[in-house]
Image (tube, grey):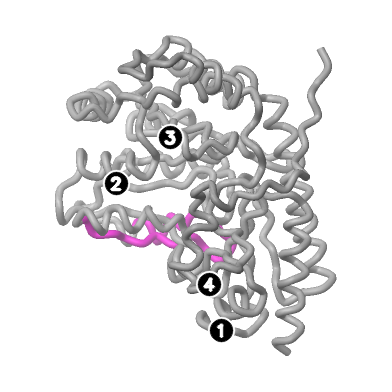
Amino acid sequence: MMNTNYNFDEVIDRKGSGDIKHDALQELWGRSDLLPMWVADMDFATPSFIVDALKQRMEHPIFGYTATPEAYWQAIIDWVATHHQWDIRKEWLCYIPGIVKGIGFVVNRFTKPGDKVIIQTPVYHPFRLVPQENGREVVFNPLTPSYEMDFDNLAEVCDERCKVLILANPHNPIGICWSRETLERLADFCHDHHILVISDEIHCDMALFGHKHIPFASVSEKAADCSITFQAPTKTFNIAGIVSSYAIVPNDELRQKFFCWMKANEFDAPNIFAPIATIAAFTKGEEWRRQMLSYVEGNIRLVEDYCHEHMPQIKPIRPQASFLIWLDCRGLGLDHDALEDLFANKARLALNDGAMFGEAGSGFMRLNVGSPRSVIQQAMDQLREAVRNEK
């Protein structure tokens, strides 16, 4: 059977589809003429084998209450075993209606107002917002300047009120695939200090350039005993609008407390399309995934080469996973407002500014390169012109 060659060069007009990427520009930037490279979804067509599976179900005229098919759980189990060499059991699994929601569920189930939640900045901003808005105190354990975990600082900031640590694995926005040694050390610390680790692994299937994702809970018994892992096919297969996330909880006590609460509130019931999309992705998607990652790697190299040649003041940090590039823009010598003005009003690009990920992100921007190469080229050209005129 011959492999299909997928076309990632196709430019698809998303305007009018209700996508946040375009529809929120006016509200957030005050203008709608920006090239949107901020929201972490891709501009590639959702693969046809997923669309076809959804279409097939839509041919049936009734969309009533639907049982979760056994094939859903088996597809997850097989995918995780094949891609991450982690043998998980069906009873460890529970559907969750989105990973950020899952973080909120864990915070509410396992902590009380006034408890502390540790995050490792610069990091995905809901890690901070969700605990804060739920009345928990956020404790910052910043990464080192070389983007390693700072265990000395972790020991300093940790006290008996620290109940949860939220781990980005792989890291967002820097795209780090954490080493086994680092994860083992974190597991030892958190287990010994009775801290529950939420491991957000939504980018786990997007390791790049020969890097390897290691699930946190797989590294040791201590890691398995003190963690709740969240994964999903949604980033990898560009189906974020079809919410299809799941929790993996090996520890019996944690699982009983969390899953019973999820079931009592019916948060564990997937929508009718989530299992269909997940089964299609995890049983038919490997070739598409490989080709997509290769294309993203090409986009990353384009950005690296372009900045090196035309904008050496901007230094892209190569991600080890995901389609997001952490741009070090400190060489431009601009403060936060001037940097935002450069990108939005002069280069006409909508990116997430680094400061939203924590104080250590000031002077950085997060660039989404999950788009056709012509779009990436256009963005680089617009940025180059803006930087040139800034001098």
| Mark 1: amino acid | Ala
| Mark 4: amino acid | Arg
Mark number displayed over residue 31: 4
Q: Earlier in the sequence, mark 2 or mark 4?
A: 4
The span from disc 1 to disc 3 (Cα, nearest Å) is 36 Å
Q: Which residue appears at 75% of the width and 41% of the height?
A: 8
The span from disc 3 to disc 4 (Cα, nearest Å) is 29 Å
- Circle nearer the viewer, 3 or 2: 3
Compared with residue 14, is residue 27 higher up or lower down, i.e. above or below? below
Mark number displayed over residue 164: 2
The residue that label 3 is drawn on is 243
Compared with residue 116, is residue 210 higher up or lower down, i.e. above or below? above
Q: Earlier in the sequence, mark 4 or mark 1?
A: 4
**Which residue reaches farthest top?**
70
Compared with residue 204, is residue 4 higher up or lower down, i.e. above or below? above
Magenta-drawn stretch contains 149: yes
The span from disc 3 to disc 2 (Cα, nearest Å) is 24 Å
Asked if residue 292 lies left or right of residue 68, the reply is right
Residue 77 is at least partly visible in this image: no
